Image (tube, rainbow, N blue to C red):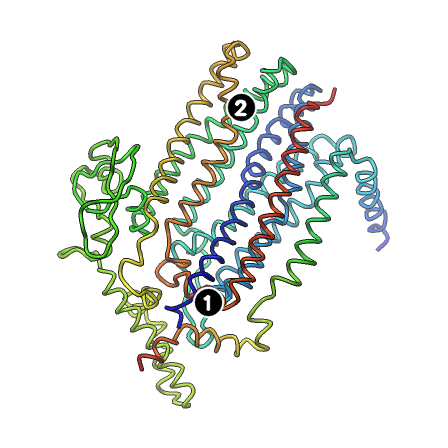
Amino acid sequence: MIENADVALTDWSRAQFALTAMYHWIFVPLTLGLSIIIAMMETVYVRTGKEEWKRLTRFWMTLFGINFAIGVATGIILEFEFGTNWSNYSWFVGDIFGAPLAIEGILAFFLESTFIAVMFFGWNKVGKKFHLASSWLVAIGANLSALWILVANAWMQNPVGMVFNPDTARNELVNFRAVLFNPVAVDKFLHTVSSGFLLASLFVLGVSSWFLLKKREEWFAKRSILIAGIFGLLSSLLVVFSGDTSARTIAEVQPVKFAAFEAHYFGKQNAGLVTFGLLKDSEVESGTMDVKDFAFRIEIPGLLSLMTGGNKEAFVPGIKDLVYGLPDSTIIAVTEKMRRGRIARDLLYDFREAKKQNDNIQAETIRKTFQDKDFVNDYFRYFGYAFLDRPEDVIPNVPVAFYTFHLMVMLGFLFVLICCIAVFLVLKGTISKNRWFLWVALFSIPLAYIASESGWILAEMGRQPWIIQDLMPVSAAVSQISPGAVMTTFILFAVLFTALLIAEVSIMIRQIKNGPKH
Amino acid sequence: MKPLLPFAAKVFRFYYDGFSNMSSWGKRVWIIILIKLFIIFVILKVFFFPDILKREYNTDEQRSEYILDQLTKSSETYD
């Protein structure tokens, strides 16, 4: 039975996917942002005709090339894992996931692969404007590739635009526009790519600061800081804005995840936003739910209500309300969702039985029921709840969600400040004298990666137990294969990706030390 | 077809020159790319990552049946 699915198998499969995705994500955000920064620098070169700008562009292009080359195809392993480790999920979701991923593959191949050759091989062989166009097309292609991956991911967080076919056990795409403009997809795309821009800006700021600390390449470093500082500042503001809209959307479509961000267990009006806090086990008992309390917190009163409901008196439901339900409200208890999910699952079972017994009339009636909007909205949308053992299973790991969220947000605001100071100091002409800031900028590089990875841990751990929100839990999605095999590939990946990372960092450090060519 | 040939030759020449005059870091990352692609597509894909449903079942109908069976097993038990 799926309810009794091997916990070790599910956990190892999740750990393997997490490892692959997190390593893959080390390479991606730098590609997204640095490609734009390079294109901006080259634009200045083409407009001014100054060779220094070409030199500067080529230096950052080298680092971009190293990162791109080491990272390329690491994402394909995730697709292998879908077929091997998550075959139930892959089949169930097939057509929806296939379309965006196919578009991503075509775009990545034609735009990036074609024009990246012009970027690297085309200096002095093609016209300046054609070369510049190629650089911009690589940047646009990389970011458009990200769009399609994020559209697919957003569908898992908020499944829309499809209809379930009980004959094939697959969800079929019926409204591509709804999938593409899924509110989660829009927020996720803006937040993810802008965070990639910010990470790349901090990378350029940090590396340029290292040159200034070493008293090398002053002209080059200051120009790089100016461009990265302005771009980083604009990106960081977009990160804050899109993060805010993203949180509002999550509060609507994944309310338990949202409550877990804030470790908000008990709903209330005038709910405060925790800016920083430490969790401890609570002395308050609430059924069989494991409750955390704050050992310490700094809170802005009323802000959570204001952000989610538009005014301080707005009621913000807590995890307890969302699990056990709230009388006189639209919140449905998880036990009721489990009941409705089981009705949908039993109907699917009846459909199979009717087909086996050649009862075509009954089969056709059930087939039509699965297309009926009321049945979909009232029952099938809770299909995944049929696989849960107890209501509390819908609660993600609250400390992980809470700490990753707050770490990401705190670092995000720190990065706004760093970009502001960088632009101010470089315009004032005193950046070289402020060595403390150069050190801060240098150490902001690993912090940017920590913030970026935290965002993904939050997004994926925060939505547990779902692989597809409300429709399929991870335990029902996993392939019935040997946990030992998954463990072996986990170790293989850990070795492979660590080797790739060491290769990238060592080649990059060597190129940075060499500096721009004269 | 004639106009295509000079264009194809130009493209070939472009890539040939690009690879021939590649810097040392470029050559190093290309070696890493090739080793990585070999590991991913020849070792991992072939030996460790079969498509389970394609391997176990011959037709889409059989695959659908298997998934439906997985999804409705509990209903069968309750029945």
Return the residue at label 1. A92
Q: Measured from the top left, where is residue A422 in percent x and y?
A: 49, 19
Q: Calculate the distance from the C-alpha at mark 1 to the C-alpha at mark 2.
A: 46 Å
Q: Looking at the image, which residue is at 36% across and 39% down?
A: A403
Q: Secondary structure at mark 1?
A: helix
- Across and down, in percent, residue A361 comes to 36, 87
Amino acid type, mark 1: Phe
Neighbor class of circle 2 (other Cα within 10 Å; few <14, some 14-19, many 20+) is many
If the image is split into quadrants, where does the C terminus of chain A sit?
A: top right
Do discs 1 and 2 share a chain?
A: yes
Q: Residue at x 44, y 21 (%)?
A: A420
Rendered view: A319 above or below A339: above
Chain of the residue under label 1: A
Q: Position of residue A265 (x, y in %)?
A: 23, 47
Q: Which is more toward the observer, A239 or B69?
A: B69
Residue at image location 71% in from the left, 20% down from the top: A51
Q: Nearer the viewer, residue A4 or A414?
A: A4
Tell me whether the residue at label 1 lies in contact with that at label 2, contact meaning CB atoms closer than 8 angstroms: no
Q: Secondary structure at mark 2?
A: helix
Is residue A255 shown above or below A451? below
State which chain disc 2 sits on.
A
Residue A442 numbered mark, or none: 2
Identify the residue at image location x=67%, y=24%. A513
Q: Disc 2 marks which amino acid?
A: Leu
Snapshot quadrant of residue A7: bottom left
Left or right, B20 with reference to A261: right
From the top left corner, tell me how far across and down residue A411 is, in percent: 41, 31
